[in-house]
Amino acid sequence: MFALRPSNRKRNVWAVSLLDVQPTDRVLEIGFGPGLAIAEFAGLVTRGHVFGIDHSQAMVRQAARRNAAAIRAHRVHLTCASVERLPSFGEPLDAILAVNSVGFWPDPVERLRELRRLLRPAGRIALVSQPRCPGATRDTTVRAAQELQDMLTQAGFTHLRVETLELDPPVACVLANNPTGMQSPAI
């Protein structure tokens, strides 16, 4: 169902485009669902690696089917895992994406600190929120974006900016960078 909803496809393609992913990047998506953004990343990351974690084995299976060729080519790596128990990704990551999942994370500021340690200096993160509560409006989206900005700031990210996609309700994407020279040892 999620893969077929046009707004989900539009939101994921848009979010991926905001991260300015390069062919050699190492990218992580947290909570990839049916793998729409993973497929977008796989089309851009031709010499790097795309990693994805999702806590649902059903979503891992669905995303694996959607991205089977890139998995066979060893460019896409999907794992059933939660954000509080991240697998190893080896070398530092260049970009991280999370769409409508931060609200489900235990202690999201601490999770964001852990993710920042996985990013190379100047690495990028994009947190996307499209509020789905009954009666959600532009104001609901603005409040959600402010909450994401506050969490990213507390976690030590810099150069925050907000982009908006005009859907109903609007989608906010908060982008930020890992400060240059601030990478911690990988966890």
Image (spheres, grey):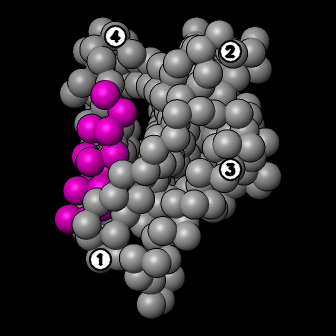
3, 135: nearer the viewer: 135
Quadrant that contains the C terminus: top right
Whole-percent x and y of residue 115?
Answer: 66, 31
Q: Which residue is drawn at 59% across and 14% down?
A: 180
Q: Which of marks 3 and 2 is nearer the N terminus?
A: 3
Question: Which residues are the magenta region?
Answer: 6-20
Say above or below: 184 vs 77: above
Instruction: Establish if 183 lies above or below 133.
Output: above
Spot the residue most to the bottom.
135
- Earlier-in-chain disc, 2 versus 1: 1
In the picture of the structure, the residue carrying the numbered disc 2 is 183
Indicate which disc residue 24 carries.
4
Residue 50, relative to residue 181: is it above or below?
below
Q: Which of marks 4 and 3 is in front?
A: 3
Of the 4 image quadrants, the one containing the N terminus is: bottom left
Going by the numbered disc 2, the residue's amino acid type is Gln
Return the x and y of residue 186 as percentages of the image width and height.
72, 15
Secondary structure that dominates the magenta span: helix
CA gap, disc 2 and disc 1: 37 Å
Q: How far apart are marks 4 and 2 (CA)?
A: 19 Å
Nearer to us of marks 1 and 4 is 1
Q: What element carries label 1?
A: loop
Helix, strand or loop status at disc 2? loop
Q: Which of 170 and 88 is in front in this view?
A: 170
Residue 70 visible, this angle: no
Mark linked to residue 151? 3
